[in-house]
Amino acid sequence: MVTVPGIPLNNEVTIPQLGFGVWQVPSDETAKVVGTAIQAGYRSIDTAAAYGNEEGVGEAIRAAGLPREELFITTKLWNAAHGYDQTLEAFDSSMAKLGLDYLDLYLIHWPLPMRDKYVDTWRAFEKLYADGRIRAIGVSNFQIAHLRRLFDKTSVVPAVNQIELHPNLQQVELRAFHAEHGIATEAWSPLARGNLLADPTIGGLAAKYAKTPAQIVLRWHLELGNILIPKSVTPSRIRDNIDVFDFELAADDVAVIGELDSGVRTGPDPDTFNPA
């Protein structure tokens, strides 16, 4: 079984550098899929209230029979629950669905700057953290301006910012800002929803290293120091995606992948995303 290295966060909590995401995993399949991931060696599981599958993640955790401290569980607050009191209620709901006594990492899923509630939401996160109900608190899809506002208005620097990040959207400026302020960078959609797997540059490197295109991209993330949460429902791919610790990319090859940055997103722009 693969052992995944850990990344220390700014409060000395350690998160596995490679975890398992369950976005778009159907709720009735989640327990089985997460169980397969845990058997393959994943110890970090990333879900969200919006995914509708927190119950399945909780079922898989219980079925695995591992000591709680061996698992790192993340969930996220959805947009409709922004605001201080609403956040506290939403957290209790997620914990009931997961069946957990404490959470390892809680994230604000989107900043929704047009609604202007993320500062009050973060204050609720700070309370939950101070009360010992969460080991680390962070954000997702926050831009530099959003992070600066949290710095100015609140007390706790986010431990993590989970952002869309892949070779086509490398977020160089935002990653540098994270590094300057002690925020860990976590990549969602690390494979650009599979769009990169047919890229000829990635394919050439896959042939060179005798690895799959997905393994090349995931290894690139690891070389940059990113935390990442690939997702699959296919057992063989679940196993392949964690089998990336027996090789390293040469610096020249990391640089070649760096040339693929086109700034193209597969998901919404955080500055304008404001769903009803």
Image (cartoon, helix red, strand yellow):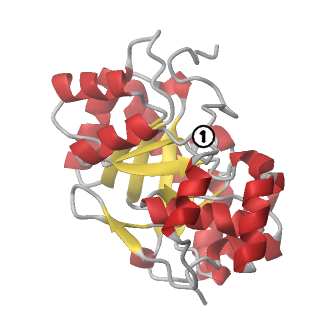
132 versus 109 height, above or below: below
261 versus 142 height, above or below: below
118 versus 217 height, above or below: above
Q: Closer to the camera, 122 or 174?
A: 174
47 to the left or right of 129: right
Residue 168, image x and y in percent? 64, 41
Is residue 33 visible to the viewer in this orientation of the structure?
Answer: no
Residue 25, image x and y in percent? 76, 53
Q: Secondary structure beneath disc 1?
A: loop
Residue at image location 61% in from the left, 63% down from the top: 218
Residue 206: name its quadrant: bottom right
Count of numbered circles on the image = 1
Residue at image location 36% in from the left, 66% down from the top: 7
The three-letter code of the residue at mark 1 reads Asp
Q: Closer to the camera, 90 or 233?
A: 233
Residue 158, image x and y in percent? 29, 42
Residue at image location 41% in from the left, 31% down from the top: 87
Quadrant (top left/top right/bottom left/bottom right) for the C terminus? top right
Residue named by callout 1: 261
Is residue 26 visible to the viewer in this orientation of the structure?
Answer: yes
Residue 162, image x and y in percent? 47, 44
111 to the left or right of 78: left
